[in-house]
Image (tube, rainbow, N blue to C red):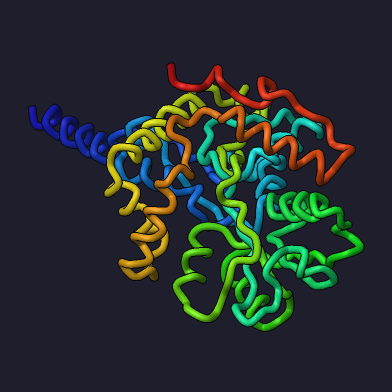
């Protein structure tokens, strides 16, 4: 009897040592620390990933180009970046797909020092403009906007890869560049400093697949269950944000702990005003604009049909 009792104690100890439920760790690579990642944080805070048996590890990159390079190399599972990169992956034969759409509107604006004489992109002709990285959404956007003016991005401007957030602010404020591209919440943080910045060109009301969960075909085929679980969790988070503003605000507070309450409220309001996808499905109109911008910026680019980009087979039914 004593032997049986001892065996039960040992067995019980082994059970206690095991995790209550094993979770699959997925690495998400973010193009930058921006509002596009907020739905993922909501999913994490509300236990939606945990309910699907998932654990998210978020890695920040200095722009979409290095993030998608990590995706193509298999260093991360999912890229939080513009659908541009899914198109580029298709061109490279890697079968890029949008698993879940996070944002339906563009997220960037060109900002310059408040004392700058430039009041438009045209006024910056002949000067240096900062982007996050070559091949990123900022690069495509700037080249598109310059060509729409009838100018040449390589001859009429000097485009420099700077990075995001702090490095971009340092470059603009030191005069290393005449202006730079910023996204939410950096735009709001800059505007909260009266007399320091002004917007020269604003792309934020443009329909655009600016933030999405981008994956490769190879990853989808190897991890179909995880892909469906991610889609379920993030779509639930996006729908929750539509009905519960406090859930979005809590995510803003956690992601940007240095923001004061007024700035948190401003970012929350701006993000909730049509920026995020309401249901996680890639908006055809946003994708149409994306293809238009990409082909104007790079006429040699192959146009990839909408149906070849969306991963609807993994979308929650």
Q: Residue at x 60, y 39 (%)?
A: 209
Q: Quadrant of the C terminus?
A: top left
Q: Residue at x 42, y 43 (%)?
A: 39
Q: In this rendering, is residue 183 above or below 130? A: above
| Residue 80 can be seen in this image | no
In this picture, residue 287 sits left or right of residue 212: right
Q: Quadrant of residue 122?
A: bottom right
Toward the right, the furthest residue is: 155
Nearest to the observer: residue 92 or residue 110:
110
**Residue 160 image position (x, y, % from top left):** 78, 66
**Residue 106 image position (x, y, % from top left):** 59, 47
Q: Residue at x 25, y 34 (%)?
A: 15
Nearest to the observer: residue 65 or residue 116:
116
In this picture, residue 224 sits left or right of residue 75: left
Q: In this rendering, is residue 213 above or below 228? A: below
Q: In this rendering, is residue 171 above or below 5? A: below
Q: Residue at x 84, y 36 (%)?
A: 301
């Amino acid at each position: 009897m004593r032997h049986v009792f001892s065996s039960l104690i040992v067995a019980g100890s082994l059970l206690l040592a095991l995790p209550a439920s094993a979770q699959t760790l997925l690495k998400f690579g973010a193009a930058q620390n921006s509002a596009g990642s907020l739905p993922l944080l909501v999913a994490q805070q509300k236990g939606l990933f945990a309910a699907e048996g998932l654990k998210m590890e978020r890695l920040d990159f200095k722009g979409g180009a290095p993030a998608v390079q990590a995706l193509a190399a298999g260093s991360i599972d999912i890229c939080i970046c513009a659908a541009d990169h899914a198109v580029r992956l298709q061109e490279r034969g890697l079968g890029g797909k949008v698993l879940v759409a996070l944002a339906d509107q563009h997220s960037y604006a060109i900002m310059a020092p408040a004392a700058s004489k430039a009041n438009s992109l045209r006024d910056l002709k002949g000067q240096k403009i900062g982007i996050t990285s070559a091949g990123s959404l900022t690069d495509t956007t700037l080249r598109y906007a310059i060509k729409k003016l009838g100018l040449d991005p390589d001859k009429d401007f000097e485009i420099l890869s700077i990075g995001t957030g702090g490095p971009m602010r340092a470059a603009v404020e030191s005069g290393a560049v005449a202006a730079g591209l910023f996204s939410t919440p950096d735009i709001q943080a800059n505007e909260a400093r009266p007399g320091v910045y002004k917007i020269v060109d604003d792309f934020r009301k443009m329909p655009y697949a600016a933030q999405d969960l981008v994956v490769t075909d190879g990853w989808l085929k190897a991890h179909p269950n995880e892909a469906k679980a991610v889609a379920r969790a993030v779509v639930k988070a996006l729908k929750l944000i539509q009905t519960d503003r406090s859930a979005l605000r809590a995510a803003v507070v956690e992601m940007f702990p240095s923001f004061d309450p007024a700035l948190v409220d401003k970012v929350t309001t701006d993000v909730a005003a049509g920026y995020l996808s309401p249901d996680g499905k890639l908006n055809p109109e946003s994708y149409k604009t994306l293809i238009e911008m990409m082909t104007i910026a790079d006429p040699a680019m192959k146009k990839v049909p909408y149906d070849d980009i969306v991963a609807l087979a993994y979308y929650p039914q």
